[in-house]
Amino acid sequence: MPHIICFRRAILHILPDHVLHRVRPAMAEMERCAQGERDMEYTTLGRTGLKVSVAGLGCGGNSRVGIGAGKSIAEAADIIRAAFDMGVTYIDTARLYGTEPAVGLALKGRQRDKIVISTKSTIRLEGERISPDCLANHLDESLSHLHTDYVDVFFLHGVSLLDYDYARDVLAPAILKERDKGKFRYLGITEPAANDPEQLTIRRAVDDEKCWDVMMLAFHMLHQTARANVFPKTQAGGIGTVMMYVVRNIFSRPGLLVEKVRGLIEGGKLSPEGIDPDDPLGFLEDEAESLIDAAYRFSRHQKGADTVLFGTGNVDHLKANIESILRPSLPEAYLARLHALFGHLTGVGLDSPEHLRR
Ligand SMILES: NC(=O)c1ccc[n+]([C@@H]2O[C@H](COP(=O)([O-])OP(=O)(O)OC[C@H]3O[C@@H](n4cnc5c(N)ncnc54)[C@H](OP(=O)(O)O)[C@@H]3O)[C@@H](O)[C@H]2O)c1
């Protein structure tokens, strides 16, 4: 880092004024980047008007803020507090994740109205659809675990296309009565990504834009379906969007990307032209710090993507991921290459969390 600052000072001394005023912002950005000092940025979650950090901490996935790797509730709460201290104001959890108590603990002593919390309930239990009363009980239990009177967004979690009409016509109208009592502010829906590779639920839900204030959906470099099928409609309807599966396993486990890409080529789903099967995204190395850095920046800067969830149980990863989400977009030429090579793929890298597969 010091050599970047020295280089900056040397350049500033020799450049003429008319050039100086044009390069100064980029140099300052370089310096902030080297020092890891970017300030958090905030955005609006669609028509809800909720102000959320562009980097949202996901308390599910494989990490479950460390609980997936054996951390205690208290240790998971420390990770969540570290995220708050880095400017994160959006936290996503769910009844299913077992992390609501950690969020509740982390909230103690914090100003509740400065933090946006979403939680979720699945709509099937032991294979059966749940009743509206049962859904309302789940919401009450979540509030109790979270030690709060309300959540900002209550999501119906992982709704399959088969259950979609039931969710929209039976559960949604019933649970809105709980909203009217002040228990949550906005209603959302999330997709069962691993079981819905074509995003049929979300593609259906965007046509019912009055019903859903917020949608959580998978979007990443090798699963870009939402660019054409979802974002134009969420933007038109003012639906808030939360990105998930942005890194998951495919970009965080060395070797998995190569394995998937080889499989896609062998299966005839991906042309080998222009792709190095031993390093399929190697061309991003010039512009990104790592594959994970590229993955977060790719999703964060997608038009129509409001906020990007990242899941981790590791404070170093937390810091690195926030830095990545705050970095500028990948350059246009690289985005165009990612769109051209992989834009037709759907359902890649949408594995279920390990604790649910065991
Ligand atoms: N249907 C649904 O509603 C649904 C489904 C899936 C996810 N979600 C939500 O989306 C959130 C994000 O999804 P995700 O958990 O898959 O998160 P993600 O950010 O896509 O991937 C997280 C994985 O990458 C690893 N990782 C993260 N940062 C890293 C880094 N800098 N270096 C190396 N490895 C790193 C994590 O392990 P470490 O712990 O070691 O960092 C974890 O295994 C979830 O937490 C949940 O809130 C919702």
Image (spheres, rainbow, N blue to C red):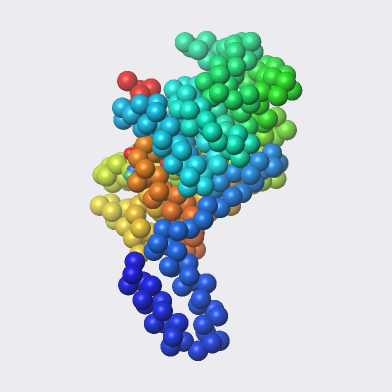
Instruction: Name the residue rendered at 72%, 20% in the picture.
Output: 181
Instruction: Name the residue rendered at 31%, 57% in the picture.
Output: 282
Q: Quadrant of residue 287?
A: bottom left
Answer yes or no: is residue 109 visible.
yes
Q: Position of residue 246 (x, y in %)?
A: 44, 43
* Residue farthest front in this picture: 109
Q: Nearer the viewer, residue 288 or 257?
A: 288
Q: Nearer the viewer, residue 255 or 148?
A: 148
Q: Quadrant of the C terminus?
A: top left
Asked if residue 81 lies left or right of residue 134, the reply is left
As drawn, 64 above or below 181: below
Q: Position of residue 219 (x, y in %)?
A: 49, 43
Q: Quadrant of the N terminus?
A: bottom left
Q: Position of residue 195 (x, y in %)?
A: 46, 27
* Quarter of the image where ligand 1 sits: top left
Q: Nearer the viewer, residue 213 or 81?
A: 81
Instruction: Name the residue rendered at 43%, 32% in the picture.
Output: 77
